[in-house]
Image: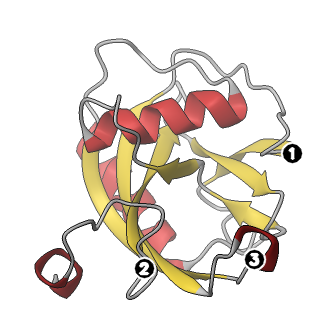
């Protein structure tokens, strides 16, 4: 990936040229019949929970899990190993008040399992839902996430 070769700070939220790497959680429902979606407050669309890598994160999978918990209060199975299942690249609109130009998020998607079906809304995710595998079109889920979900379901069995 050119981003890793051409920048010294590919995980920095302040790396805007070519964007930066973020991590996303594809959380499987305990029954493995759906995945967790959060309605993103800024993008106004249904996405997987996720975000920026922090210095305190031990691994990229931990970043994805931390973000899912922060955004939805989902409980991840403690011994669940985050498995890399895909990537989604999407544009982030400019934010003049934060001096952020338009840039790309190169989202690494990690699958993990939920301990229960309990969720909560937060400021970042005012709506949350368990999306069945046959409901992706209803939530307008991007094809890259659908492929990652199918990959995750196949590796979870």
Residue 99's spot in the image, x, y percent? Answer: 68, 75
> Could you give the CA–CA distance between mark 1 and mark 2, rounded to whole angstroms?
27 Å
Dot 3 or dot 1, earlier in sequence: 3
The reply, left or right, for residue 92 in relation to residue 156 is right
In-front residue for pair 114/38 = 38
The quadrant of the image that shows the C terminus is top left
Q: Are marks 1 and 2 in contact (CB under 8 Å)?
A: no
**Within-10-Å neighbours for mark 1: few <14, some 14–19, many 20+:** some
In-front residue for pair 155/113 = 113
Q: Quadrant of residue 79?
A: top left
The residue lying at 84 percent from left, 57 percent from top is: 41
Residue 64's spot in the image, x, y percent? Answer: 43, 42
Nearer to us: label 3 or label 2: 3
Q: Is residue 90 above or below residue 108?
A: below
Q: Is residue 65 above or below residue 9?
A: above
Dot 3 or dot 2, earlier in sequence: 2
Circle 2 is placed at which residue position?
19
Circle 1 is placed at which residue position?
127
Nearer to us: label 1 or label 2: 2
Nearer to us: label 3 or label 1: 3
């Amino acid at each position: 990936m050119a981003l890793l070769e051409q920048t010294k700070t590919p995980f920095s939220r302040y790396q805007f040229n070519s964007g930066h790497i973020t991590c996303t959680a594809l959380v499987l429902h305990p029954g493995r019949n759906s995945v967790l979606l959060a309605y993103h407050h800024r993008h106004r669309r249904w996405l997987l929970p996720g975000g920026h890598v922090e210095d305190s994160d031990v691994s990229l999978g931990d970043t994805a899990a931390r973000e899912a918990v922060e955004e939805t209060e989902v409980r991840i199975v403690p011994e669940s190993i985050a498995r890399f299942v895909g990537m989604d690249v999407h544009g982030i609109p400019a934010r003049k008040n934060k001096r952020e130009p338009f840039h790309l998020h190169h989202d690494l998607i990690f699958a993990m399992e939920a301990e229960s079906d309990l969720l909560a809304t937060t400021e970042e995710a005012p709506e949350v839902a368990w999306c069945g595998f046959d409901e992706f079109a209803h939530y307008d889920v991007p094809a890259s996430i659908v492929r990652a979900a199918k990959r995750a379901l196949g590796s979870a069995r």
